[in-house]
Amino acid sequence: MGTSERAAPSRLALMALERSDATPARFIEVFRAAALQAGAVARRLQGEIRPRSKEGDNPESEALSAADLASQDVLLLRLADAFPHAAVDAEEDTQTARLFPPPAPEQPLIVVDPIDGSLNYLRGAKAYAVMAAWIAGGQYLASVIYFPAWRIMYWAEAHKGCYRQRDGGTPEPAAWTNLPRRILVPPRTPQAARRRLQALGFDVKVSHCSAVDSAGPALGRAVGSAGLLAPDRRRAIGFLLACEAGGSVMFPDGPWHSGDPKVGARKLGAHAVADSEERARRILSAALG
């Protein structure tokens, strides 16, 4: 699925864009700066804090640290100042999340994850990210993912491409060459599904970071990924990067069209991300068996 095949912004999205400075481009500008600050906090605290606990049914969803909370405060303070009329869907329940108005159909919505891959972070690994997306009219119009340990930022605006920038470097299009034949899967992926993917000639690796999973081809880290559960809003942040870099996100009933997973009648479930629509279909078919 190329970027030109996805739906153009809806009427509600266009109404949201008419607000003075509440645009996807402005969101990218503000969040990129905030992510650098939050990332610096995360790097400084990694290895020096104790894990906390929160409700969850697996180690990934339960992982939480003071770094998550501090990083989110950094992000939300900047976002509330820049976008006082936007609503927010924040990963953690902090006081700063209450600076935003409640969600409404005509309002932009900012989805924030201060440290995606918290379990990796707490284990001292480098595969964790600060990320957010701008949703208007039920569609993802902008996404930003920053990897503090790798010092590299990725961002995408709908129908305008995907870009990357290393700290201190020059922005450049995020394009891949010679992607590794690697498929990333979540930890609870059944062994039978992993074996079917391996039978296609892929090296199947477990990942604990949805930012890496869902944007893998755009990052150059994998040819694709597979997930058997319905994606949440945070996982879809990486979908936009993958699509804007020329890749595809596929569900059993067809390609992703930038829609918010929590809005609309369409039920999203198992999915695959890849560098092409044809490969995404093959990955999804193998994962489902």
Image (spheres, grey):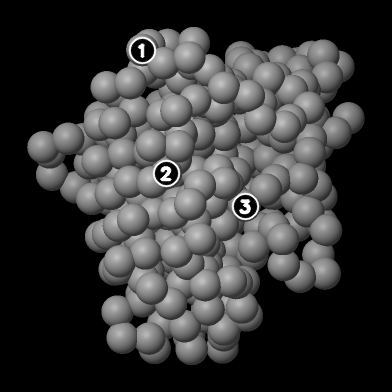
Residue 239 % position (x, y):
55, 49
Mark 2 element type: helix
Quadrant of the drawing holding the N terminus: bottom right
The residue labelled by disc 3 is 233
The residue labelled by disc 1 is 48
Of callouts 1 and 3, the N-terminal one: 1
User: Would residue 248 be visible to someone looking at this image?
Assistant: no
For the residue carrying disc 2, how many other residues have a C-alpha within 10 Å: few (<14), some (14-19), or many (20+)? Answer: many
Q: Three-letter amino acid code at disc 3? A: Arg
Task: Depth check: give the residue in front, 194 or 21.
Answer: 21
- Relative horizontal placement of residue 198, taking residue 10 as reference (left or right): right
Residue 106 % position (x, y):
57, 84
For the residue carrying disc 3, how many other residues have a C-alpha within 10 Å: few (<14), some (14-19), or many (20+)? Answer: many
Residue 247 % position (x, y):
52, 47
From this view, report whether residue 276 is shown above or below residue 77: above
- Relative horizontal placement of residue 113, taking residue 37 as reference (left or right): right
**Distance (Cα) linking label 3 and label 2:** 16 Å
Task: Depth check: give the residue in front, 83 or 240.
Answer: 83
Residue at 62% over, 52% down: 233
**Number of the label disc, if any, that sits on residue 72:** 2
